[in-house]
Image: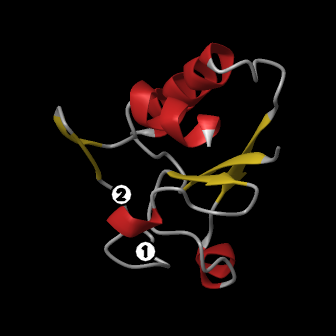
Amino acid sequence: MRVELLVVPNCPHEDIASTRLRRALEDTGYAETPVEVRIMTAETVAATPAFAGSPTILIDGTDPFGDQAAGSGAFSCRIYHSAAGHSGAPSVEQLRQVLRR
């Protein structure tokens, strides 16, 4: 499985997204799976249709939260929705569900 974390420079949600993603990977038996962090620039945003704001998590090239994205190619913060409300990163439980699929 290929896991990528796409972020703009100095993303305020990068750390929480990375921490939650790592925990979900550990909880679902994928602790050894590397997470590739890609810093997005204006050029890479234009060339990456799956990028819908920072942070964007891709699993095997697909954004599992794409249905929540307001639009792609946004060089800005991304908001995720959960039962607990809005956050700058998916919850650990949302990530576990995605990884179990």
- Reply above or below: 37 against 68: above
Q: Which amino acid type is marked by label 1?
A: Ala
Q: Residue 62, located in which quarter of the rendered image?
A: bottom right
In the picture of the structure, the residue carrying the numbered disc 1 is 74
User: Which residue is most to the left?
Assistant: 85
**In the rendered structure, are the residues bearing label 1 and label 2 in contact, judged by CB atoms less than 8 Å apart?**
yes
Give the CA separation, mark 1 to mark 2: 8 Å
| For residue 5, side relative to residue 80 (left or right) | right
In the picture of the structure, the residue carrying the numbered disc 2 is 78
Foreground pick, 75 / 17: 17
Where is residue 96? Give x, y as percent: 53, 30
| For residue 59, side relative to residue 33 (left or right) | left
| For residue 36, side relative to residue 41 (left or right) | right
- Reply above or below: 30 against 41: above
- Reply above or below: 45 against 101: below
Indicate the secondary structure of the residue bearing disc 2.
loop
* Mark 1 closeness class: few <14, some 14–19, many ≥20 residues within 10 Å: some
Foreground pick, 20 / 45: 20
User: Which residue is most to the front?
Assistant: 101
- Residue at the spot 67% in from the left edge and 16% down from the top edge: 26
Residue 97 disc label: none
- Residue at the spot 41% in from the left edge and 27% down from the top edge: 93
- Tally of marks: 2
- Residue at the spot 82% in from the left edge and 43% down from the top edge: 1
Q: Which amino acid type is marked by label 2?
A: Arg
- Residue at the spot 57% in from the left edge and 18% down from the top edge: 23
Where is residue 82? Give x, y as percent: 25, 41
Indicate the secondary structure of the residue bearing disc 1.
loop
Where is residue 47? Give x, y as percent: 69, 83
- Reply above or below: 60 against 44: above
